[in-house]
Image (cartoon, helix red, strand yellow):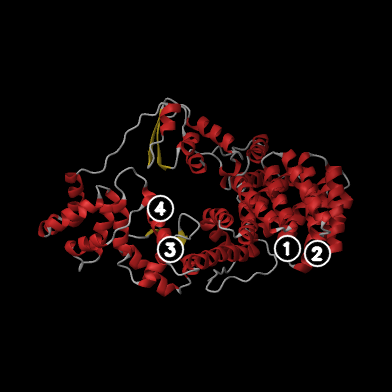
């Protein structure tokens, strides 16, 4: 659903949270449009129904290995059962793959091979790949291999004679050397739809040169595909076969060891990447990856962000896979580590999904601090998507957990989250109470980055309540701590608050100077959302000094950033309105 919504132009940062709301948005985006929608390999009727547009101008083509009678009963779907290729069609396909001369040279063996394929195009393709990638292999020899194998592949369940499909796969698998066969089996443990080369090195426990050799052999036997350079995937039927081979022939512990290594790879690499994005975030307790795990390293935050961008789909899948396979600790650590990235992209639906799963894992682990952390993340997502009541419920649970277990740091973070929650709802007095509590708890816990962050929150509350002098004092106090710690992200936020306080005091030159400090830091850190927010504030100080052109430039730059990062509509609309007031020409894209 998410892929379709994005393809139809929906803003990925403001997708509805519930499946029902997403389905409603999908129907509204497809209404009246002339579309052919292809749903390939549907599992069952329930999977397909939410993706039916409901508009007479759209046509939907659904393929499945099952008959899906529910679609015919509930939606009047016209069903067409595709038969297997008839002998002439099958032979034509094999001729196109191998050439007529080779078929003519071994006609009896070609007929036997086609009989084993039972008219299934994928089976013919796999056999042809074996023959074209191994010039020493004859049709007669391959037919003999097929005769010697004798186990069916029940997972196909096509309704057609399917024993030959497993035989076809076996003909490729049994031709592998032992190391390549092991790598093929281990690929079935990968949690996502594809896997990058570094993660595959952890999955298999092999150094990269040996791994590349094994992957080349698997590609030659048509058992894995390199979908894009450096990323590999395995057809779902082949994955099912690999799982069966794991159960049948793999040494005890092979699959579990591979799964543990690849989950550790994602969990520890994501943790290291997050430390670059948010170095003053409270660290997790140290944990050692399994032997054979090869972690990725990043030179800077830009490379860490790029890694998250390429791996976030696999990471979210890995959270779910870890829970399904009993690896709750890795599931929670992965969810924790990906949160910063998802929040910077404003992908709140994904934050909700991974932390709903992570919360259940934390409950099973009996870890109250982890439970509170996930509840704060869920509250964050709820607030950003306008679900304030749910956010308060999550934070109430988090605060109760923290207080019940005497966790000063968790209590501090929860009060700070509550302060931000109330500030977003316009109750600045309540926000100030909670932010002051956060200062006290962070101080008691000896957590200086948290204390400085909470002081900045108190400063913001003061200026919202009209006490701008108090706001300046708290900002200056926070900046001293952040300067000593080298907390550039914290300083960027505090400089923005201090600029706002000076602006409200009428000291606009000081305000502009503070905003420029904040802008410089945010640009160096790559915090584009915060950069845009500060540009909006800067524009107001320019206006106060009647510098209309610099104000218009700041707003235009802020709008371009908001549009580029797919910011929420209220922020975009606010900047456009300010530009219109200045006689500017805001972008409409």
User: Dot 2 corresponds to which residue?
Assistant: 447
Local secondary structure at mark 1? loop
Q: CA distance from mark 4 to mark 3?
A: 15 Å
Which of the 4 quarters of the picture holds residue 454? bottom right
Disc 1: CA contacts within 10 A as few (<14), some (14-19) or many (>=20): few
- When the figure is inspected, residue 159 is found, relative to residue 26, above or below; the finding is below
Give residue 230's position: percent from left, percent from top: 42, 63
**Furthest residue to the front?**
150
Q: Name the residue at 55% across, 69% down.
A: 295
Q: Residue 217 location in percent, x, y?
A: 33, 67
Foreground residue among 550 and 223: 223
> Circle 4 sits on which residue?
236
Up-down: is 305 above or below 537?
below
Mark 3 Cα shell of 10 Å, populated few (<14), some (14-19), many (≥20)? many
Disc 4 versus disc 2: distance between alpha carbons?
Answer: 49 Å
Residue designated by label 1: 282
Name the secondary structure under disc 4. helix
Between marks 1 and 3 in the image, the one whose residue lies nearer the viewer = 3
């Amino acid at each position: 659903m998410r892929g379709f919504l994005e393809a139809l132009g929906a803003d990925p940062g403001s997708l509805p949270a519930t499946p029902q709301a997403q389905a409603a948005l999908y129907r509204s985006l497809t209404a009246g449009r002339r579309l052919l929608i292809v749903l390939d390999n549907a599992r069952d009727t329930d999977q397909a129904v939410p993706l039916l547009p409901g508009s007479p101008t759209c046509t939907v083509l659904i393929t499945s290995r099952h008959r899906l009678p529910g679609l015919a009963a509930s939606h009047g779907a016209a069903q067409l059962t595709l038969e297997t290729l008839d002998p002439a069609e099958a032979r034509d396909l094999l001729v196109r793959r191998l050439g007529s001369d080779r078929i003519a040279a071994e006609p009896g063996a070609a007929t036997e091979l086609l009989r084993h394929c039972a008219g299934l195009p994928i089976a013919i393709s796999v056999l042809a790949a074996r023959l074209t990638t191994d010039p020493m292999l004859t049709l007669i020899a391959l037919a003999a291999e097929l005769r010697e194998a004798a186990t069916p592949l029940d997972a196909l369940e096509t309704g057609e004679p399917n024993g030959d499909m497993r035989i076809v796969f076996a003909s490729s698998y049994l031709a592998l050397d032992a190391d390549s066969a092991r790598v093929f089996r281990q690929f079935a443990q990968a949690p996502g739809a594809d896997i990058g080369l570094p993660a595959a090195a952890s999955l298999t426990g092999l150094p990269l040169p040996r791994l590349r050799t094994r992957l080349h052999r698997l590609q030659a036997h048509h058992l894995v595909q390199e979908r894009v350079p450096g990323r590999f995937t395995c057809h779902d039927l082949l994955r099912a076969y690999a799982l069966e081979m794991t159960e049948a022939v793999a040494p005890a512990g092979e699959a579990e060891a591979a799964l543990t290594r690849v989950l550790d790879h994602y969990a520890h690499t994501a943790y290291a990447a997050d430390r670059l994005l948010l170095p003053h975030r409270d660290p997790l307790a140290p944990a050692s990856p399994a032997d054979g795990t090869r972690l990725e390293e990043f030179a800077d935050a830009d490379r860490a962000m790029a890694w998250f961008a390429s791996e976030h789909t696999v990471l979210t899948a890995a959270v779910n896979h870890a829970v399904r396979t009993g690896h709750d600790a890795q599931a929670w650590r992965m969810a924790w580590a990906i949160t910063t990235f998802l929040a910077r992209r404003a992908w709140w639906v994904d934050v909700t999904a991974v932390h709903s799963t992570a919360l259940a894992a934390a409950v099973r682990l009996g870890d109250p601090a982890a439970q509170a952390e996930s509840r704060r993340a869920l509250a964050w997502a709820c607030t950003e998507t306008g679900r304030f009541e749910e956010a308060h419920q999550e934070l109430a649970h988090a605060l109760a957990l923290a207080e019940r277990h005497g966790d000063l740091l968790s209590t501090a973070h929860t009060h700070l989250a509550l302060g931000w929650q109330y500030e977003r709802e316009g109750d600045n007095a309540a926000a100030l109470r909670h932010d002051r509590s956060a200062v006290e708890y962070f101080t008691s816990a000896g957590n200086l980055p948290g204390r400085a962050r909470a002081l900045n929150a108190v400063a913001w509350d003061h200026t919202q309540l009209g006490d701008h002098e108090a706001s300046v004092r708290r900002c200056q106090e926070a900046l001293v701590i952040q300067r000593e710690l080298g907390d550039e992200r914290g300083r960027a936020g505090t400089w923005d608050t201090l600029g706002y306080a000076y602006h409200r005091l009428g000291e606009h030159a000081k305000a502009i100077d503070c905003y420029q400090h904040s802008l410089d830091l945010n640009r160096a850190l790559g915090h584009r959302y915060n950069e845009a927010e500060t540009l909006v504030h800067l524009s107001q100080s320019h206006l106060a000094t009647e510098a209309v052109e610099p104000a218009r430039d700041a707003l235009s730059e802020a709008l371009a950033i908001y549009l580029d990062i797919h910011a929420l509509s209220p922020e975009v609309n606010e900047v456009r309105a300010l530009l219109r007031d200045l006689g500017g020409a805001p972008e409409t894209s």
